[in-house]
Image (tube, grey):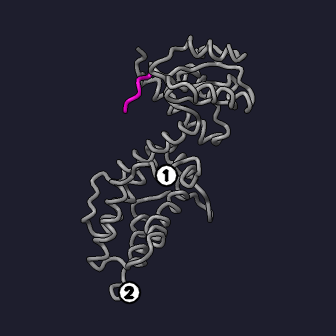
C-alpha cells in the first residue's frame, strides 16, 4: 500500500512554484524538480499526471488561498468604502505573505494551460457580486460593466502596489505604500465610482 | 473518487517517437484492465504512467517488451 506523503507533496508544490516563477513553464522539468524537492521523479508522477496537471493544481490551490485571504472578515453587506478597504488590505496581506503564489497567479491568469472553468472560485465570486449589487442598490456605486468596475476599484490598487513591490522610482525617491497613501487613493476611487448625483 | 496511489505505476521506457507512442496507445486501448495512461515523450526517461486496479507492473513490462520496447519501473 502506497501512503500519501503530505510533506513530499508540499515540497514538490513549493519547489515547482519557485521554478515556474523563476524560469517559466518551459523551464520546468520533472527531473530538476525532483532534485530540488529531494524526491524521486516517480514520486512526482504519482501525484501529478504531467506538467500541465501540476501547473493546473498549483493554480487552483493558489486561487483557493487567495480567496481565503480575500474573504477573511469581509462581508458583502458592508458599505462600498469599508468593503473595498477590507478587500485592499486583505489582498495586500495575501501578496505580502505569499509573494511567489501571487506572481504565479499573475503569470497564469490568462494562460491556456489552465482550465479556468474548473477552478472553483464560486464562494469568492458570489461574495464579490453580492457586494457590488448591494452597493448599487444603496446608491453608492454607478452600475457599470464588471471590467470597468474592476479596473477602477482594483486595477488602481494593484498598480500602486506593484510600485511598492518593485520599489520602482518614477521621480527621485523609491515608493513605499502606507495606509495614508492607500486611504488617499481609496477616496479618489470612491469618487470615481459614485453615481453622478452623489458626486458633488 | 479518491485514487489509491498503489494503482499508479510509473515506468522508464524506450518509447521515443510519436509512432511508438501510438503503437502503445493501441495496446492499452485494447486492454480493459488499464483505467488510464499517460506518456511523456518530452521527459528524458520517456515516462509512462499507468493507472490500473487489475494489472501489476510486471504485466505491463512484459507487454511492452513483447512489442520490442525497453521498460522498467522508475524509482
The residue positioned 47% from the left and 23% from the top of the image is: A8
Instruction: Mark 1 or mark 2: name the one nearer the start of the chain.
Output: 1
Which residue ends up furthest to the left in the rendered image? A77
| Residue sitting nearer the eye, A33 or B49 | B49
| Residue sitting nearer the eye, A124 or A177 | A124
Magenta range: B1-5
Taking the magenta stretch, the answer to whether it contains residue A35 is no
Q: Quadrant of residue A126?
A: bottom left
Residue A4, numbered circle? none
| Mark 1 in CB contact with mark 2 (< 8 angstroms) | no
Chain of the residue on which disc 2 is drawn: A
Q: Is residue A58 left or right of residue B73?
A: left
Taking the magenta stretch, the answer to whether it contains residue B2 is yes
Q: Nearer the viewer, mark 1 or mark 2?
A: 1
Residue A196, numbered circle? 2
| Residue sitting nearer the eye, A148 or B59 | B59
Q: Is residue A122 above or below residue A142?
A: above
Q: Is residue A18 above or below residue A181?
A: above
**Regarding mark 2 in the picture, which secondary structure is present there?**
helix
Q: Is residue A103 visible in the rendered structure shown here? A: no
Q: Report the magenta stretch's main SS.
A: loop
Q: Is residue A110 left or right of residue B22?
A: left
The residue tagged 1 is A116
The spot of residue B46 in percent (x, y) is 68, 25
The residue positioned 37% from the left and 58% from the top of the image is: A125
Chain of the residue on which disc 1 is drawn: A
The residue positioned 35% from the left and 77% from the top of the image is: A141
Respond whether the residues carrying marks 1 and 2 are from the same subunit.
yes
The spot of residue A195 in percent (x, y) is 36, 83
**Regarding mark 1 in the picture, which secondary structure is present there?**
helix
Amino acid at each position: 500500500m502506497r501512503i500519501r506523503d503530505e510533506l513530499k507533496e508540499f515540497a514538490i508544490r513549493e519547489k515547482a512554484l519557485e521554478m515556474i516563477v523563476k524560469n517559466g513553464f518551459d523551464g520546468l522539468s520533472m527531473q530538476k524538480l525532483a532534485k530540488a524537492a529531494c524526491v524521486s521523479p516517480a514520486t512526482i508522477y504519482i501525484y501529478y499526471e504531467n506538467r500541465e496537471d501540476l501547473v493546473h493544481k498549483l493554480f487552483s490551490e493558489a486561487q483557493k488561498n487567495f480567496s481565503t485571504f480575500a474573504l477573511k472578515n469581509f462581508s458583502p453587506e458592508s458599505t462600498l468604502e469599508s468593503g473595498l478597504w477590507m478587500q485592499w488590505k486583505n489582498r495586500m496581506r495575501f501578496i505580502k505573505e505569499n509573494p511567489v503564489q501571487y506572481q504565479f497567479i499573475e503569470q497564469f491568469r490568462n494562460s491556456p494551460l489552465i482550465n479556468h472553468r474548473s477552478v472553483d472560485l464560486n464562494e469568492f465570486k458570489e461574495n464579490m457580486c453580492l457586494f457590488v449589487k448591494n452597493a448599487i442598490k444603496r446608491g453608492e456605486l454607478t452600475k457599470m460593466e464588471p471590467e470597468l468596475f474592476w479596473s477602477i476599484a482594483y486595477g488602481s490598487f494593484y498598480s500602486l502596489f506593484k510600485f511598492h513591490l518593485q520599489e520602482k522610482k518614477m521621480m527621485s525617491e523609491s515608493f513605499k505604500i502606507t495606509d495614508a497613501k492607500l486611504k488617499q487613493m481609496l477616496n479618489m476611487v470612491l469618487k470615481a465610482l459614485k453615481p453622478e448625483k452623489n458626486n458633488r | 473518487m479518491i485514487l489509491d496511489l498503489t494503482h499508479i505505476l510509473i515506468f522508464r521506457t524506450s518509447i521515443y517517437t510519436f509512432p511508438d507512442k501510438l503503437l502503445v496507445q493501441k495496446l492499452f486501448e485494447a486492454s480493459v484492465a488499464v483505467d488510464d495512461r499517460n506518456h511523456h515523450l518530452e521527459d528524458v526517461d520517456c515516462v509512462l504512467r499507468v493507472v490500473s486496479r487489475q494489472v501489476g507492473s510486471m504485466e505491463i513490462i512484459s507487454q511492452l517488451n513483447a512489442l520490442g520496447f525497453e521498460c522498467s519501473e522508475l524509482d
